[in-house]
Image (cartoon, rainbow, N blue to C red):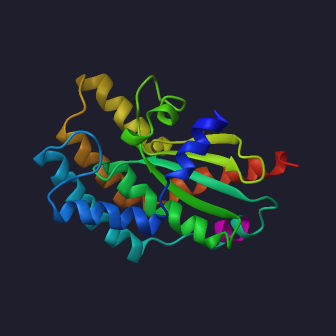
Amino acid sequence: MKIAIGKALFKSHSYSEYRKLVSDLLRSEKSTGKEQSPELTNYSGLNETRMNRLEKTMKISEGIVENLKSLKNEYIWLVISEGWCGDAAQLLPIFDKMATASEGKIELKIVLRDENEELMNLFLTNKAKAIPKLIVINRETGGALAHWGPRPKGAADLITNYKKEHGVIDETVKTDLQLWYLHDKGLSTQLEINEMMLDLDSQVD
């Protein structure tokens, strides 16, 4: 696993580099990833707008900021993403703001799913390559300590329940999901990741 993580980190992007990569591809009417289609490019464009809005409006709660700054150890958050992924667009700005708030305790790195199949295959969700996936790495040892994703519990439950009832993931539930994120304002994600990090930090020597 350490080899796959090392390879991925070698070709990873900072948050700003990732944003620029997605934006540059959009100007050429392309999306990230192996598959190219007008639909995926359209999703990437919508996500660009979402991320711009979230960067301006998303706030990390004061208590969580203090917890992140007080972490005893240092970590890398390695996130598997793609520009067309709606969940990633909702969550990456939160990851970035939380990492920034940690004042050096957490460094955010992003890799593209289709360019890192070896890593992705280590962190499947129900045998699927669901993204985004946040992998918490001990900066000192390079080992993976935990992972989170592809979405917070409330959002995951929404998708699971809809699929049970209707048998498919369609545009209706995708719209419902975006509304869930809008109303949640990033709080569920912050709380879940905060709890995970405090738990991990208490275990790492």
From the viewer's side, name the closer residue of 15 and 160: 15
Q: Is residue 21 above or below residue 135?
A: below
From the viewer's side, name the closer residue of 11 and 165: 11
Question: What residue is at 28 percent from the left and 24 percent from the top?
Answer: 165
Residue 192 picture location, percent across and down? 59, 50
Label the magenta part by its dominant secondary structure: helix
Question: What residue is at 59 percent from the left and 55 percent from the top?
Answer: 191
From the viewer's side, name the closer residue of 1 and 76: 1
Question: What residue is at 18 percent from the left and 41 percent from the top?
Answer: 171
157 with respect to 162 (left or right): right
Question: What residue is at 23 percent from the left and 60 percent from the top?
Answer: 25
Specify the quadrant of the image occupied by residue 64: bottom right
Q: Outermost residue toward the bottom?
A: 56
In reply to whether residue 65 is colored magenta, the answer given is yes
From the viewer's side, name the closer residue of 60 and 8: 8
42 with respect to 50 (left or right): left
Residues shaded magenta: 63-67
